[in-house]
Image (cartoon, helix red, strand yellow):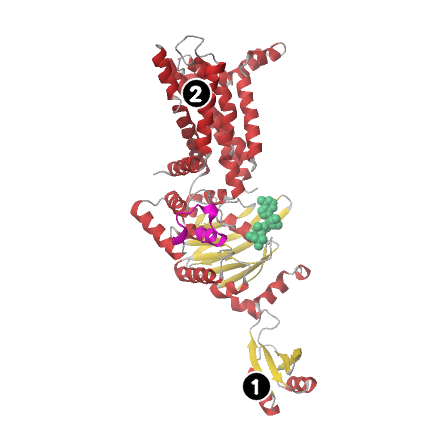
Amino acid sequence: MGTMVEITDLRKDFGSIVAVDGVTFSVGQGEVLGFLGPNGAGKSTTMKMITGFLTPTSGSAKICGHDILEHPLEAKKRIGYLPEGAPAYQDMTPAAYLTFIGEMRGLGGQDLQKRVADTVEKVNLQSVLGQPIETLSKGFKRRLGLAQAILHDPEVLILDEPTDGLDPNQKHEVRTLIRTMAPEKAIILSTHILEEVQAVCTRAMIIANGKVVTDGTPADLEGQSPNHNTVVLTVRGGDVYAIQAQLVKIDGVSKVEELGQDGELRQFRVFPDQGRWIIADVGQCAREQQWEVAELHVDRGQLDEVFRSLTAPKQALT
Amino acid sequence: MGRIQVILKRELAGYFATPIAGVFIVIFLLLSGAFTFYLGNFFVRGQADLIPFFDFHPWLYLVLIPAIAMRLWAEERKEGTIEMLLTLPVTIWEVVAGKFLAAWVFTGIALALTFPMWITVNILGNPDNGVIAASYIGSLLMAGGFLAIGSCMSALTKNQVIAFILSVVVGLGFILSGFPMILNLFSGWTPHFILDTVSSFSFLTHFHSISKGVLDLRDIFFFLTLIAFWLFATATIIDMKKAE
Ligand SMILES: Nc1ncnc2c1ncn2[C@@H]1O[C@H](COP(=O)(O)OP(=O)(O)OP(=O)(O)O)[C@@H](O)[C@H]1O
Ligand SMILES: [Mg+2]
C-alpha cells in the first residue's frame, strides 16, 4: 500500500485569515479519506492546494512522489478533481465537455470515445448528453463533475462534496462507484453527511479552524462518542425509579440515565464502566426482574455527537 | 493535438455556440461598411483604394474588441471554471495563448468577411492589391494588440463591464499617443525622447505605416512584442488573482 498523497505542514493565509493552519497527512492506495468539518474549516482550501490551484503559503503536497509546485504537470496528470460546486462550461453539452477534458488530458481517438462512453454509463449521464450544461439540474451537473474527474482513470481522486445535491438513489450509486474504484486509488473526499463517512470512507479526518482535530477510522471516531457502547433499554410498564435502582446495581454499570417515557414505555441509557461490555448483564437483569422488554440494543455512538463535541465553538479550545 | 489547440478549438466553438459570433460579425460588417461609405466618402473620393475603410479600423476595434475580450477571463473566474482549467495538466502559458489565439482567429474571420469590400474596389477600378493585402495584415496585427490588452483587463476583474471599460480606456491611450493634437499638448515642456517614445507606442503610427503598403519588420515586431507583453501580464495577473 504505497503512499500516493503526501501533505506536509500545509498552510494558507488569505490576508489575516488563516484558512489552513499546518495540515500534515498522507493517503495510501486503497484508502478513502473523508474530510469533515464545519463550514469555513479549510477543507476546500486544502483540496485546492493539493490539486495545484492555490499556491500554499508554506508546506508541500506530493502526488505519487511529484511535488505539486515543482512538477505541476506530472502531479496534475495523476489527479482527478471535482471542485466545490462542480463548475463546467455552461454553453457546452456534457458530451462536448467530456471530450474537451479528455483531449486536454492527452486522450484521443477511439480510446477517448470509449472512455467517455464508459464514464457516462458509470455516472448515469446518458439521458442528458446532448443538452446544454446550463439547463441541467443540480444533480446532473454534479455527476458531470464526477465524470470529468474519473475520465482518465487517475491514481488520485480529490472530490469536494461529491454527493451534494444528489437524490438518495444517486447518492447510493455514487458511493458504490467510489467504493468500487477505491482499491486501486487514493481518494480524498469532503462531505457534510456523516453517514457518508461510515458508508464509504476507510478513514475520517475532522478539520476545524484549519487544523486537523482528529484522524482515524470511522469506528475510532464513533468510539469518541460519549454514548459509545452504552446500552439502550426500553421497558413496558413498571416504576421508573425502581428500574433505575436495579440497573445501577449491575456490575460494570457506571450510570443510568432516563431517556423519557412514552405512554407505557420507559427508556433508559445504561453507561458501562470503561471498556466493559454490559448488554448481556442488562438482559439478564431484565429477565430476573421480569420486566417486559420492548427494546434492547448497544449504541455504537453517533458521529454527529463526536463532530459537535470536537468542533462546536465553545469546546474548540479544549 | 497540442493543448493550446484543444483550448483554441473549444473557445472558438464557444463563440459560435452563443449569439456572440453572429452579433459581433454583423455589427462589425455593418459599421465598417457604414463608416466607409458615409463618413469616408468612399464614392465621392473617386479613388479605387480601401483607405477610408481601413482608417476606421482602429476606432471600430477600440469599441468592438473589448466586447470580445471582456469575457476571456472574467467569465472563467466568475463561473469558477478557471479552477477546472488550471488543475488540468496544462501550463498557464498554454491557457493564455490558447484563449488569445481563439479570439484572434475569430476577429480574423470577421475581418475576412469584409472581402466584398475588396471585390467592390476591384470592380470599380484598379486598386493596388499589394497595399490592400498589407493593410489587412496590419489590421489583423492591430486587432491582436487590442485583444491582448483586453485579455489582460479581463484577467483583472470578475466583472465583464469593468473589463470592457478598462480595455477601452487603455486602448484609447494606445491610439491617442500618436495623435499630433495630443502630442502637441506635451511638446512644449516634455523632452523629445519621451515624446518619441510615447508616439512610438501608437497603434495609429504603426498601422498607418503598414497600410501604406510597406510591411516594415519593425511595425510587425512592434505589434508582436506588444501582444507578447500584454499576454505575459495576463498570465502573471491570473496566477496572482485566480483564487479571488
Ligand atoms: N479567496 C479567498 N479569500 C479570502 N478568504 C478565503 C478565500 N477562500 C477561502 N477563504 C476563507 O478560508 C476559510 C476556509 O474556507 P474553505 O472554503 O476552505 O472552507 P470549507 O471547509 O471548504 O467550508 P465549507 O464546508 O463551507 O465548504 C474560510 O474562512 C473562508 O472564508
Ligand atoms: Mg468547501
Q: Say whether residue B18 is left or right of residue A35.
A: left
Question: Is residue A110 one of those drawn in magenta?
Answer: no
Query: Split into 4 quadrants, where in the image is the C terminus of chain A?
Result: bottom right
Q: CB at mark 2 closer than 8 A to ligand 1?
A: no
Mark 2 element type: helix
Q: CB at mark 1 closer than 8 A to ligand 1?
A: no
Front residue of this view, candidates B29 and A156: B29
Does residue A136 lie above or below A289 as drawn? Answer: above
Q: Which residue is mark 1?
A: A283
Does residue A232 lie above or below A8 as drawn? Answer: below
Cα distance in 3D space between marks 1 and 2: 91 Å
Q: Is residue A226 visible?
A: yes
Residue type at mark 1 is Gly
Give the residues in magenta: A125-145
Residue type at mark 2 is Ser
Residue B218: where, in percent of width, then height?
43, 17
Residue A296: where, in percent of width, then height?
56, 81
Per the picture, the main secondary structure of the magenta-coloured stretch is helix
Q: Which residue is mark 2?
A: B139
